[in-house]
Image (tube, rainbow, N blue to C red):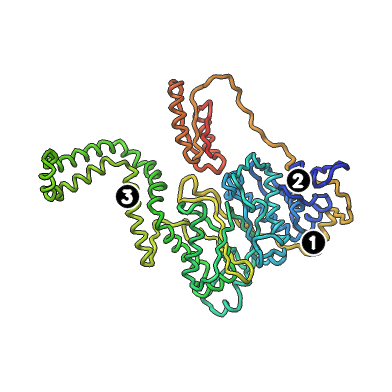
C-alpha cells in the first residue's frame, strides 16, 4: 500500500501539494486515506495492488490504488472511477505510445471518448458544452490521466514533456457521445439509416460500456456555420477546416477527431445513411481541397522519398552520364543551324521559321531539360499533376491521388453537443503518411468498462478496506508517486580517448541524417582509422526497439552518437 505523508501543521495543505509538484498547476483534492479507501470500495471490484500497466516515461508499474489516488486528486467521485481505470489502461497500451505523445513538441495529449450505458451511470455530459467546463465527471476523468502520467510516470514540464506551446487539453479532455440522438424516433422510422455509436464502429456491442483513448495535438477547431442547407456544401466546409489542421499543405493525416453537433447531424442524416457514408463524403472533399497544393506536395514530400528509394540510389550513378549524353544529342539536333548564329540578325530572323522545325525544337527542349536541376523536373511534374487534380475537382470527381487524410477511416466521428447551433469541431491526431517515421506514431485504443458494483458489493468492500467516512484528518495523505526503485542508467567511464568502432544512430527525425553525414565526414578527417557504423530507428516517437539495441551491442560499438532534432 502507499506510504502516508504527514503535512506539517504550519503549511497549507494545497500549498504543500503544489510545492511538491503533485498537481497539474491547479489545486487538487487531498488524497486522504479515507477518500482513497472509499474510491476503491465503491468504485471498483479490483484489488488495490493489481498492476494494470507501466507508465511512460519512467515505465513504472501502475496499481489500482495509485489510480484511485490520482482520481481523488482529480476530483472524481466513486461513480467515475471505473471509467478512469479503463481510460488509464487504454493509455498504458504499448500501441498507444504514451511516451512519444507526452514528449512531442507538438503538444500531444490523450483524449477520452466514452460510450455505452456508463455515460449516464457516471453522469457524463454529451450535450451543451460537451468539450468545455462545467461537468465534474468529464473534467475529473480526463484530469486523472494527466496526474497518473505526471506522478507515476514521472513526466515533468521542461523534462521529458517538452511541448513548444502545448494546449489546454493537457489539463483534461473527456467527452461522451449522444447515442440517444442516433436512435431517435425520426431516424428509427427509416430502416436505411444506420448511424451507430463510435464504439459500435470499433467492434463493440451497443449495450457495452467502452472507453476509447486517442491522441490529439491541437484544437478543437470549430466550424462556424449559420446558413448551410446542403449536405454537400456542409461537407465541403468541414473539409476546408480539416485541411487547415497541422498545416494546409501537409497531407495524409492518420486521425482526425470529428465532433458533429446535433443540428449538423440532423442535416447530414437527411441524405447520408451512416457514419461510413459521411466518412467517404468528407474524404472526397478533402481530396478536392488538396488539389491546389499538389505541386508543393510532390516537390517537397514526394521528391525526397524518391531520392532515398533504393532503386533511385542504384541508378543515381547513371544520372550524370545520361545528362552528358542528352546534352550531346541535343547539340547534334541543333548543330545543323548553329552557323545561323554567326549570320546577320536580319538573315537569322528571316530564317527563324526554318530554324524552329520539329528536330530543333526537340533538341532545344532536351538541352534545357538536361541542364535543369532535378528539383525543376519534380516541380514540372507537380504542376502537371496539379492541373489534372484541379480539372477532376471542377467536374465533381476529385482525384484521390492526394488527400488531407490517409483514408475515410481516418475520421473518428462522434455526435455530441448542445441542441442549438450549427457548430462542429475537429481535432488533429498525431502522425501522418502511409509509411516512414511519421506514420505509425499512435492509434486509438478502446477498453471495456468494468461492471457497476451492487450496493451489497460496495458494503462488503467497505468492510474489507475499513472505510471510515467519519475520518476528519486532512493533514495525512497517501503518496501519489511511484514508490519503488526507479532504474537508472550508469554512464560508462570516460578516459578521454575514442575506441573503435563508433555507432551513429539516426532517430528518424527530420534532417538528423544530414547532421550525422556532416559529423561522419569530420570524424573521418580527424580519426581516419576509426570505422563508423550507421543505424536508424524506425520512428522517432517510440523508444529504441530492443532488437535494434541488441544489434548495436553485437556490432562491437564502443560509443554511440544519436542524432536528435528540434
Q: Dot 3 lies on which element?
A: helix
| Mark pair 1, 3: CA separation | 71 Å
Q: Dot 2 lies on which element?
A: loop
Please rate how many residues cluster around mark 1, counting C-alpha atoms within 10 Å: few if below 14, some from 14 to 19, many from 20: some
| Mark pair 2, 3: CA separation | 60 Å
Residue 548 rendering spot, x and y as whole percentages: 52, 37
The residue that label 2 is drawn on is 480
Circle 1/circle 2 CB separation < 8 Å: no
Circle 1/circle 3 CB separation < 8 Å: no
- Left or right: residue 141 versus residue 347 is right
- Left or right: residue 143 versus residue 316 is right
- Which comes sooner in the sequence, label 1 or label 2? 1
- Which comes sooner in the sequence, label 2 or label 3? 3
Circle 2/circle 3 CB separation < 8 Å: no
The residue that label 3 is drawn on is 380
Regarding residue 481, the answer to whether it shows in the image is yes
Label annotation for residue 183: none
Q: Residue at x 67, y 35 (%)?
A: 487
Q: Residue at x 25, y 39 (%)?
A: 322
Mark 2 or 3, which is nearer the eye? 3
Q: Dot 1 lies on which element?
A: helix
Regarding residue 202, the answer to whether it shows in the image is no
Amino acid at each position: 500500500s502507499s506510504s502516508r505523508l504527514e503535512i506539517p501543521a504550519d503549511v497549507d495543505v494545497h500549498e504543500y501539494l503544489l510545492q511538491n509538484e503533485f498537481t497539474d498547476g491547479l489545486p487538487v483534492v487531498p488524497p486522504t486515506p479515507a477518500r482513497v479507501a472509499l474510491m476503491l470500495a465503491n468504485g471498483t471490484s479490483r484489488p488495490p495492488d493489481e498492476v494494470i500497466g507501466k507508465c511512460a516515461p519512467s515505465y513504472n508499474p501502475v496499481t489500482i490504488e495509485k489510480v484511485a489516488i490520482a482520481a481523488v486528486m482529480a476530483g472524481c467521485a466513486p461513480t467515475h472511477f471505473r471509467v478512469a481505470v479503463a481510460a488509464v489502461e487504454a493509455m498504458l497500451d504499448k500501441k498507444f505510445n504514451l511516451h512519444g505523445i507526452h514528449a512531442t513538441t507538438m503538444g500531444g495529449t490523450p483524449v477520452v471518448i466514452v460510450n455505452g450505458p456508463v455515460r449516464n451511470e457516471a453522469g457524463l455530459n454529451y450535450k451543451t458544452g460537451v468539450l468545455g467546463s462545467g461537468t465534474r465527471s468529464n473534467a475529473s476523468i480526463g484530469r486523472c490521466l494527466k496526474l497518473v502520467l505526471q506522478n507515476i510516470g514521472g513526466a515533468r514540464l521542461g523534462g521529458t514533456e517538452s511541448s513548444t506551446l502545448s494546449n489546454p487539453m493537457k489539463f483534461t479532455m473527456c467527452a461522451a457521445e449522444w447515442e440517444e440522438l442516433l436512435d431517435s424516433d425520426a431516424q428509427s422510422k427509416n430502416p436505411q439509416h444506420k448511424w451507430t455509436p463510435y464504439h459500435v464502429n470499433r467492434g463493440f456491442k451497443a449495450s457495452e460500456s467502452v472507453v476509447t483513448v486517442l491522441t490529439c495535438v491541437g484544437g478543437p477547431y470549430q466550424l462556424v456555420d449559420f446558413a448551410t442547407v446542403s449536405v454537400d456544401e456542409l461537407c465541403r466546409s468541414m473539409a476546408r477546416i480539416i485541411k487547415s489542421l497541422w498545416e494546409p499543405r501537409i497531407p495524409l493525416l492518420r486521425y482526425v477527431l470529428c465532433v458533429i453537433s446535433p443540428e449538423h447531424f440532423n442535416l447530414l442524416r437527411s441524405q447520408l445513411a451512416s457514419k461510413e457514408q459521411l466518412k467517404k463524403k468528407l474524404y472526397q472533399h478533402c481530396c478536392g481541397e488538396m488539389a491546389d497544393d499538389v505541386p508543393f506536395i510532390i516537390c517537397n514530400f514526394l521528391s525526397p522519398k524518391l531520392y532515398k528509394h533504393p532503386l533511385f540510389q542504384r541508378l543515381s550513378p547513371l544520372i550524370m552520364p545520361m545528362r552528358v549524353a542528352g546534352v550531346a544529342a541535343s547539340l547534334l539536333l541543333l548543330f545543323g543551324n548553329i552557323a545561323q548564329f554567326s549570320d546577320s540578325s536580319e538573315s537569322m530572323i528571316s530564317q527563324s521559321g526554318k530554324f524552329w522545325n520539329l528536330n530543333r525544337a526537340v533538341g532545344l527542349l532536351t538541352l534545357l531539360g538536361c541542364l535543369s536541376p532535378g528539383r525543376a523536373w519534380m516541380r514540372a511534374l507537380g504542376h502537371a499533376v496539379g492541373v489534372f487534380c484541379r480539372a477532376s475537382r471542377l467536374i465533381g470527381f476529385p482525384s484521390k491521388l492526394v488527400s488531407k487524410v490517409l483514408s475515410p477511416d481516418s475520421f473518428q466521428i462522434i455526435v455530441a453537443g448542445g441542441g442549438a447551433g450549427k457548430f462542429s469541431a475537429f481535432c488533429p491526431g498525431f502522425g501522418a503518411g502511409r509509411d516512414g517515421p511519421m506514420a505509425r506514431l499512435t492509434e486509438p485504443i478502446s477498453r471495456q468498462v468494468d461492471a457497476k458494483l451492487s450496493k451489497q458489493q460496495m458494503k462488503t468492500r467497505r468492510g474489507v478496506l475499513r472505510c471510515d467516512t467519519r475520518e476528519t484528518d486532512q493533514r495525512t495523505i497517501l503518496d501519489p508517486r511511484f514508490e519503488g526503485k526507479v532504474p537508472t542508467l550508469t554512464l560508462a567511464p570516460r578516459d578521454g580517448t575514442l575506441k573503435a568502432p563508433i555507432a551513429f544512430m539516426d532517430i528518424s527525425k527530420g534532417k538528423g541524417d544530414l547532421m550525422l553525414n556532416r559529423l561522419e565526414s569530420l570524424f573521418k578527417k580527424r580519426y581516419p582509422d576509426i570505422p563508423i557504423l550507421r543505424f536508424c530507428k524506425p520512428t522517432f516517437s517510440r523508444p529504441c526497439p530492443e532488437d535494434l539495441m541488441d544489434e548495436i551491442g553485437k556490432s562491437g560499438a564502443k560509443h554511440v552518437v544519436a542524432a536528435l532534432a528540434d
